């Protein structure tokens, strides 16, 4: 499980057994030791071949140690980076971010070294399973790695930032960019914030052979650049893995762990995997989306007929144990050009022509049942467990689904540590809108899906259209409080489900 064991032991021994975080127990109340058990089983041959994994998530989470990127990360923009964050028992953290010019993280542009303090506040009531924190940055420094990178920075950074006068910057040297007295504008010019620290979650995978993998989920980054320094995260980015307990083998983990601001990790070139969508792809885990959405995805592509089919199973909890509704969407797709923004990725256009919905619980059924005739399937005939086709009503106003509907997409495939293919589908706009114009095409990705070996190939697929949480909440008014709560969850779910694929 551990490719950098030797170097890490000292760090960990120091923290073992001590009380690491001041947790205001009042805020955590009943959940002060909530160890959720997340058992996720997918009807997918690929996953059945894997060893059984039990996942737990402690609330409050234990953060001590170093957490590293497992691959070249892509943020909206796009931005390409690797991260190595270290949390100390003293509540101080040190975050190292390396930025690159390319989607393979082979050409480092600059690195940021951020120091600060973090305090756990309370279990999030918006994003169940997450913990809200407060952070304070005390210092940020930058190391520019090349003259070309310096020139690019010159167009965004003010000419002078605390310890740095851009014209005189020498590559490889650390300059102060921010301290508690000055430099705010310099960080803002980089689109930088540590708002991701505002929402955290740690999951531990217990493998049947005794090993464990620990993952740190930090808040998501808004897809709209102008919002990213103000946005309060409600979803997560792809997780960092604990440098002691990570998936094995993970050559990237070791490189990132050993890096410093002066020596950024240069990731090895990966052979380009040809993009082949054929067959069936499923979520690796219960996924959390911005705006409080818990779901799993299950897609089948039929390239010969350019047809797709997507099943989105929605839940009200972060363990994906309490189903709320299932949505089956299908339609056609067209593969476009290789992306010029994210090299290695490919542009697609998806068309959703059919959406079918099944309510998995009474409150969802009631909600859908109460819609006006002609607006959302057959009004008055919604029942738990009975699927309804939304095509005759051109979608569902309540769910914000309009049919037919078109979306502009970005896909890429990669091989995981076991050389199994992973499929990355574009991240949905954080505001819940739909990428229905080429300008709104994603520049970053959702959690990767895994290929089911021997998956059946049936055409059909996904997407809804924009969804409007106001409408959902409106529909709830006058119903009892429980229903409203469900609505709130459902509303966002729908908002994002749309967003989901
Ligand atoms: C929570 O309780 C379980 C068993 O009761 C224990 O193993 C675990 O260490 C506890 N977690 C925390 C954060 O105290
Ligand atoms: C849906 O509405 C019909 C007609 O008003 C009613 O008979 C039925 O019981 C409702 N179903 C649910 C699940 O509320």
Image: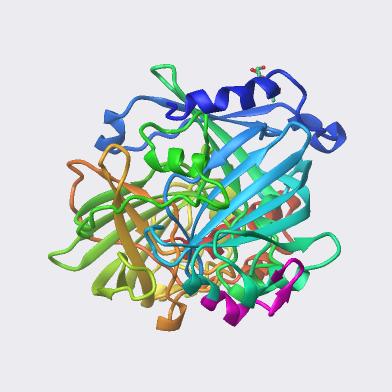
Magenta region = 151-164
**Residue 354: % across, % down:** 33, 68
**Residue 264: % across, % down:** 49, 52
**What residue is rendered at 68% in x and 53% in y?**
114
Q: Is 175 above or below relative to 189?
A: above
Q: Is residue 43 left or right of residue 431?
A: left
Residue 158 in sight:
yes
Q: Is 238 above or below relative to 438?
A: above
**What residue is rendered at 31% in x and 29% in y?**
50
**Is residue 162 highlighted in magenta?**
yes
Residue 126 in sight:
no
> On the rendering, which quadrant does ligand 1 occupy?
top right
Quadrant in the rendering for residue 368: bottom right
Residue 223 versus residue 251: which sits nearer the camera?
Answer: 251
**Is residue 286 highlighted in magenta?**
no
Question: The C terminus appears in which quarter of the rendering?
Answer: bottom left
Residue 476 versus residue 179: which sits nearer the camera?
Answer: 179
Quadrant in the rendering for residue 156: bottom right
**Residue 419: % across, % down:** 25, 41
Question: The N terminus appears in which quarter of the rendering?
Answer: top left
How many numbered tags mark residues here?
0
Residue 207 versus residue 362: which sits nearer the camera?
Answer: 207
């Amino acid at each position: 499980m551990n490719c950098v064991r030797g170097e890490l032991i000292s760090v960990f021994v120091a923290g073992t057994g001590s009380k690491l975080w001041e947790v205001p127990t009042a805020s955590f109340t009943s959940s002060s030791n909530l160890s959720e058990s997340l058992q996720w089983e997918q009807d997918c041959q690929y996953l059945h071949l894997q060893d059984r994994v039990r996942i737990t998530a402690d609330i409050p989470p234990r953060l001590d140690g170093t957490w590293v990127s497992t691959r070249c990360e892509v943020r909206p923009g796009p931005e390409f980076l690797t991260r190595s964050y270290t949390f100390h028992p003293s509540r101080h953290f040190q975050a190292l971010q390396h930025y690159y010019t390319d989607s393979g993280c082979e050409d480092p542009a600059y690195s940021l070294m951020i120091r600060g303090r973090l305090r756990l506040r309370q279990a999030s009531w918006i994003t169940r399973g997450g913990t809200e924190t407060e952070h304070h940055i005390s210092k940020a420094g930058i190391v520019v790695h090349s003259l070309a990178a310096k020139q690019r920075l010159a167009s965004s950074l003010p000419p002078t930032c605390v310890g740095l006068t851009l014209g005189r910057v020498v590559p490889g040297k650390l300059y102060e960019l921010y301290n508690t007295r000055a430099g705010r504008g310099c960080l803002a010019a980089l689109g930088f914030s540590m708002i991701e620290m505002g929402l955290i979650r740690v999951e531990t995978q217990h493998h049947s052979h005794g090993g464990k993998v620990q993952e740190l989920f930090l808040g998501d980054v808004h897809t709209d650049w102008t919002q990213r320094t103000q946005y309060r995260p409600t979803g997560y980015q792809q997780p960092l893995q604990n440098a002691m307990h990570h998936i094995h083998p993970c050559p990237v983990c070791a490189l990132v762990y050993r890096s410093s601001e002066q020596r950024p990790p240069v990731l090895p070139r990966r052979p380009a995997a040809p993009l082949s969508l054929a067959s069936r792809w499923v979520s690796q885990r219960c996924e959390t989306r911005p705006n409080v959405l818990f779901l799993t995805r299950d897609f089948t592509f039929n390239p010969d007929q350019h047809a797709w089919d997507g099943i989105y199973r929605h839940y009200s909890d972060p363990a994906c144990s309490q189903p709320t509704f299932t949505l089956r969407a299908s339609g056609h797709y067209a593969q476009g050009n290789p992306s010029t923004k994210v090299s290695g990725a490919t542009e697609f256009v998806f068309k959703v022509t059919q959406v079918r919905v099944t309510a998995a619980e009474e409150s969802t059924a009631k909600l859908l049942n109460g819609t006006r005739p002609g607006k959302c399937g057959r009004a008055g005939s919604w029942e738990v467990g009975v699927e309804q086709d939304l095509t005759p009503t051109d979608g569902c106003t309540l769910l914000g689904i309009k049919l037919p509907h078109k979306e502009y997409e970005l896909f890429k495939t990669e091989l995981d540590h076991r050389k199994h293919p992973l499929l990355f589908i574009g991240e949905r706009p954080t505001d819940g809108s739909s990428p229905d114009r080429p300008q709104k095409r994603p520049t970053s990705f959702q959690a990767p899906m895994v290929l089911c070996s021997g998956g059946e190939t049936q055409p059909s697929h996904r997407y809804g259209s924009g969804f409007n949480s106001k409408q959902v909440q409106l529909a709830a008014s006058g119903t009892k409080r429980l229903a409203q709560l469900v609505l709130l969850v459902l509303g966002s779910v729908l908002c994002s489900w749309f967003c989901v694929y």
